[in-house]
Image: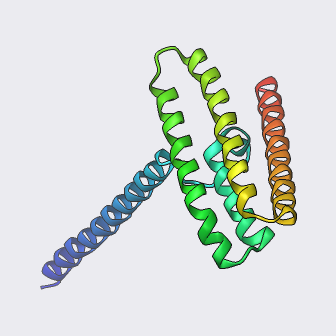
């Protein structure tokens, strides 16, 4: 009788541990897959070095600055939202085309030019809706965020060089 209970208990424990391991492995896989999908959509707000080079992340951060830094009213946000959406879609299309290009250097050069052109149009559209004070504050917040991202990127590069030297 004791042997039966011992065997049944051992089987039950193995089954429970197996289910626990399987569930955690599946959950970890889902999390990694979701992060990849999120990153592929270019929707992630950037931290560190990515913010300095990803125009979509800079646009997302600009929306955050406008909403919480400048603190514009709901009506203004409703007017500005289509401009942000259109610009985001344009930037994502430009980035996708650059990634699919065979000639990477030319694609990057073209991307830089088209991003500057898109941003110029974007700010011109914003000036039509926002007041001068709101526009000044948004520009200031955007520049500060960009400067901080560049500092973090430079620090990251310095740390990487230092790490490689001491290996």
Residue 69 place in picture, x, y as percent? 79, 68
Location of the C terminus by quadrant is top right
Quarter residue 157 falls in: top right
Residue 149 seen anywhere in this rendered image of the structure: yes
Q: Nearer the viewer, residue 32 or 126?
A: 126
Residue 84, x across and y down, in percent: 60, 56
* Residue at x 85% of width, y 45% of height: 147
Give whichever of 92, 75 is nearer the camera: 75
> Farthest bottom residue?
1
Q: Examine the image and state in which quarter residue 158 appears.
A: top right
Indicate whether 109 appears above or below 125: above
Image coordinates of residue 164 in percent, x first then y, are: 76, 26
Q: How many marks?
A: 0
Residue at 53% x, 34% y: name it: 94
The quadrant the N terminus occupies is bottom left
**Residue at the (23%, 70%) spot, across then down:** 15
């Amino acid at each position: 009788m004791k042997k039966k209970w011992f065997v049944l208990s051992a089987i039950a424990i193995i089954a429970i541990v197996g289910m626990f391991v399987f569930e955690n492995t599946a959950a970890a896989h889902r999390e990694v897959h979701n992060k990849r999908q999120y990153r592929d959509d270019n929707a992630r707000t950037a931290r560190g070095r990515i913010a300095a080079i990803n125009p979509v992340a800079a646009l997302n951060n600009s929306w955050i600055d406008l909403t919480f830094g400048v603190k514009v009213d709901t009506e203004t946000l409703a007017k500005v939202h289509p401009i942000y959406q259109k610009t985001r879609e344009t930037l994502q299309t430009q980035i996708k085309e650059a990634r699919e290009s065979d000639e990477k250097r030319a694609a990057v050069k073209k991307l830089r030019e088209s991003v500057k052109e898109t941003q110029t149009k974007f700010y011109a559209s914003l000036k039509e809706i926002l007041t001068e004070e709101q526009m000044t504050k948004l520009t200031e917040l955007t520049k500060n965020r960009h400067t901080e991202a560049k500092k973090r990127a430079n620090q990251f590069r310095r740390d990487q060089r230092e790490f490689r030297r001491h290996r």
